[in-house]
């Protein structure tokens, strides 16, 4: 546990293998633990019930804490807003991601992207599904939804990584945020003059209480969406593939009945949550699991720990395809519930389905090293697989 506690001091992007043993002990002995977090002292909350309490009481537990965290590089976004301000801004952004508002060609576009990637390695009989598959799909999708030229997605990927990794390297995070703004500025001007139906066009013409959003507000939204949409979803796809490859019986089950891909995605979200923390600040003195928190207390919700709380999930450390878990917190809970949850699930479903359609006999490369790692975000760094080689689809 000492290691985990030290890690919280500054290295949120550390490739920690197993935070779960420490979480289990914390849930049992110190469920609300005062730690030295990178931005100062804060309480780590590890139990399911406490995480739920915090997420469902935004009056006592404000999201303004995000202003001192990720907000420093992203600017002011809905993540750090409370009450009416949050409701107003969310009303602009959230409808853009509900199923019927997403461009109707999106599923076909995602499928085409995914098959094009598989074409590149289908005849090789082996691949690293992180480097060659999962890492590029979501960044291209979010770039498309926002309206960013597709040829620039690699640059965006780097900026996204630098933005979410800013706690470990602040100057790089700020530079990426600034580069992104400079890149977006002329695109916004174009959309203002000539809307095209993409998200940028929607944002430049949207109104909050009869007023248009300022450029700075729009940049902040987009700075949030780039990493929120890409750096999380590629991890979900990687974790789902890892879970299935690591459980061959589940893989066969899903291969035979594709509806179960939904189960696999949901259980993966619980078992290895791609985003491990959400942050809040106490607005008044309060008590959680018997611990008194002063007004202004910084709170870090360990979503990944809550999702493995044995008080709510039987055999919580095991991936079980048929679990049909009760509510988990991988997408948060309450008012700030992830606005992109539907899009993330859609991408994961299409990607996994396509791989199963195209690659028979898919399995981990024998003897290969593999694991899911990370503290703030979790995913495999590599997914070395072998399969029966097949022809590219379009050859
Ligand atoms: C597997 C993929 C994803 C995971 C695990 C994830 C996780 C989360 C979590 C935990 C929160 C809640 C934060 C809090 O309560 O403070 C959140 C909020 C949010 N997410 Fe996601 N996310 C994912 C994908 C996406 C995608 C694809 C988008 C956009 C297209 C997106 C956009 C957002 C936005 C805008 C918020 C802020 C909502 C609010 O504050 O009202 N996310 N996400």
Image (spheres, rainbow, N blue to C red):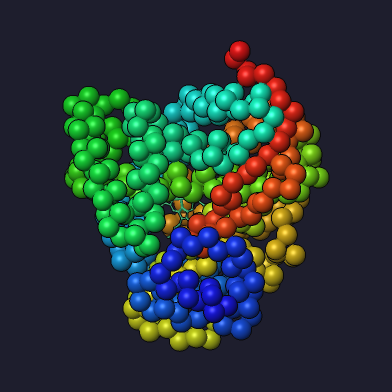
Q: Residue at 66% across / 27% down in the picture?
A: 124
The quarter of the image holding the C terminus is: top right
Q: Is residue 23 visible?
A: yes
* 18 is higher (above) or lower (below) than 183: below
The image quarter containing residue 346 is top right
**Residue at the limit of the structure toward the right, as seen here:** 249
Instruction: Give the answer, above or below, for where 364 lies relative to 38.
Output: above
Q: Residue at x 59, y 34 (%)?
A: 351
Question: Measuring 68% from the left and 39% from the top, which residue is drawn there?
Answer: 385
**Residue projecting furthest to the front:** 367
Q: Residue 44: horizontal and vertical position, in percent?
A: 49, 75
In this view, the residue farthest toward the top is 395
Which residue is more in the foreground, 264 or 333?
Answer: 264
Classify residue 336 by image quadrant. Answer: bottom left
Asked if residue 145 shows in the view, the reply is no
Residue 1 horizontal side relative to residue 362, left or right: left
Horizontal placement of 320 versus 172: left or right?
right
Image-based side of 131 in relation to 175, left or right: right
What is the count of numbered marks?
0
Which quadrant is the N terminus positioned in? bottom right
- Which residue shows up at 49% across the image and 68% down it? 301
Residue 150, image quadrant: top left
Compared with 305, 222 (above or below) is above
Instruction: Give percent across and percent down for residue 361.
Output: 77, 33
Residue 205: x, y in percent?
24, 35
In terms of depth relative to the viewer, which is nearer, 3 or 164?
Answer: 3
């Amino acid at each position: 546990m000492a290691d985990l506690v030290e890690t919280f001091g500054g290295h949120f992007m550390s490739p920690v293998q197993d935070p779960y043993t420490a979480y289990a002990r914390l849930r049992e002995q110190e469920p609300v633990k005062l730690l030295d977090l990178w931005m100062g002292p804060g309480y780590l909350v590890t139990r399911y019930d406490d995480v739920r309490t915090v997420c469902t009481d935004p009056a006592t537990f404000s999201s303004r804490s995000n202003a001192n965290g990720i907000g420093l590089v992203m600017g002011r976004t809905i993540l750090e807003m409370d009450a009416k301000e949050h409701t107003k801004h969310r009303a602009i952004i959230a409808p853009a991601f509900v199923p019927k508002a997403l461009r109707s060609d999106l599923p076909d576009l995602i499928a085409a992207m995914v098959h094009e990637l598989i074409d590149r390695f289908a005849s090789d009989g082996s691949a690293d599904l992180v480097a060659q598959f999962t890492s590029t799909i979501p960044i291209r999708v979010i770039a498309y939804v926002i309206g960013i030229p597709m040829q620039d997605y690699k640059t965006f990927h780097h900026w996204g990584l630098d933005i979410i990794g800013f706690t470990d390297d602040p100057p790089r995070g700020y530079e990426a945020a600034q580069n992104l703004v400079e890149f977006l500025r002329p695109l916004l001007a174009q959309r203002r003059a000539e809307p095209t139906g993409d998200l940028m066009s929607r944002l430049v013409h949207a109104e909050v209480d009869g007023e248009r959003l300022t450029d700075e507000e729009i940049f902040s939204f987009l700075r949030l969406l780039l990493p929120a949409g890409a750096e999380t979803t590629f991890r979900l796809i990687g974790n789902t593939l890892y879970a299935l490859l690591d459980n061959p019986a589940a893989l066969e089950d899903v291969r035979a009945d594709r509806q179960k891909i939904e189960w696999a995605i949901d259980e993966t979200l619980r078992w290895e949550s791609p985003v491990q923390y959400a942050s809040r600040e106490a607005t008044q003195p309060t008590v959680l699991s018997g611990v008194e928190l002063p007004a202004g207390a910084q709170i870090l919700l360990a979503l990944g720990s809550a999702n493995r709380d044995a008080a709510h999930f039987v055999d919580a450390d095991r991936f079980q395809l048929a679990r049909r878990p009760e509510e988990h917190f991988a997408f948060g809970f309450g008012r700030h519930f992830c606005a992109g949850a539907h899009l993330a699930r859609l991408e994961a479903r299409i990607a996994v389905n396509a791989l199963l359609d195209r690659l028979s006999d898919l399995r981990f490369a024998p003897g290969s090293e593999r694991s899911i790692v990370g503290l703030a975000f979790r995913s495999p760094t590599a997914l070395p697989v072998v399969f029966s080689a097949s022809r590219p689809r379009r050859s």
